[in-house]
Image (cartoon, rainbow, N blue to C red):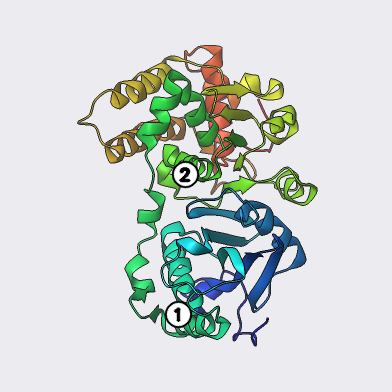
Amino acid sequence: VRGPPPPKMVATAASALTNPSGLVGAAVLERDRNNDAVWSWVYPEVSKELRSIILDKSAVLDQDLEKPRRVFGRFKQTWFYVVTCPADSIPDADLPLVSTVSMIILADKYHPEMYYSLAALMLQQYTPHGSGPSILSAFISIFTSGSFEKFAISDYKDVRKAYLKGSLKSVISKFGIESILIYIAVLLKKRVVVVCPDPEELVTIVRVLPQMVFKRLNWDIIYPYVDATEIEIEQLTASTEPYIAGFTDPSIADREDLYDIIIDVPNTSISIASHASNHFGLGKIHKEIAMYMTSATEDDSVKDMDVIKELVERTDNLLEGLNKLAAPSESNADKMVVSMEAIRARKMPPSMHKFLYNLALAEGMVETDGTA
């Protein structure tokens, strides 16, 4: 069932001005008593490729699903947030022909808590009678006015709260001293792949990792839940930007072309791709950061925010040191660049030469796009 298209629902940078809700669309996906998946309500539309991606991740066909499950992901410029529940677990639900129901929210921005809450609200509107118009009413109200019943976009206006969700300390505790490799990868804008068989745990870990370099405030680098399908792999291989991508399939480890480091959650290990090993040389600075991170996890008085602030300060110190090596570009006097010659002039181990050059490269402070 399709509703009429809402006004100017285009996921562009300008849409943040005309559509503060970030809403792009919504849908209901159900498993009927014949164990078939049915898109019972779609507004205004969901492309064929996105339907396939969401269906695979929704768990709507999982006959063993016993409790609600929440996952989110991203395909191209569209974020999708999926809340899936057994029909008989939803209070006041009257869906006699339905075993499982998924509420899907499509948006052009990152904010899991806001869209999970919205999905729960729309489930409450839909499940008493399986009524699409009741969801449409909520959708249009939020799209146009920013609120519906007890839900208000204004309650979620500080997106930094979404950035700070999760526990960086728990990630560091899990991987111990090897956590320094994650820090280096995020700092140097390398490609990171995370493998975890539990989708909910997977998206929770992936969303935390940009906190390693919180000062960038960039969560557009994450692809929290990716399947190893041709269309989803293609969006990674086509990307010219760094990313942090989450997979449930451990066989992705065989695809070294997709990552510089891979984080194996069940085996609590981190591996460096053979082509990237020379980017992860360690020096005194890395040892100090690694020792701080591991000691912080052992101190209950140190909170997640304390760790984030400390890493911000240490990152700032690194960048300040890099700026001291910078000189005006020969081709653009307004641009400050760092040369390998300037780095080598400082008395440091060779591993630090390469690290600092690659940091300059990540910060756009080199003359060319070459590597050291």
Q: Residue at x 67, y 58 (%)?
A: 55
Give percent across and percent down for residue 188.
Answer: 55, 34
The answer to whether residue 165 is left or right of residue 242 is left
Q: Is residue 14 visible?
A: no
In three-dimensional space, the C-alpha distance between marks 1 and 2, rounded to whole angstroms, equals 27 Å
Q: Residue at x 29, y 26 (%)?
A: 296
Give percent across and percent down for residue 60.
Answer: 62, 57
Identified by mark 1, the residue type is Ile
* Picture disc at residue 142: 1
Give the camera-side residue of 33 and 138: 33
Q: Is residue 44 visible?
A: yes
The answer to whether residue 47 is left or right of residue 176 is right
On the rendered image, what quadrant is the C terminus found in?
top right
Give percent across and percent down for residue 286.
Answer: 44, 20
* Picture disc at residue 204: 2
Secondary element at image label 1: helix
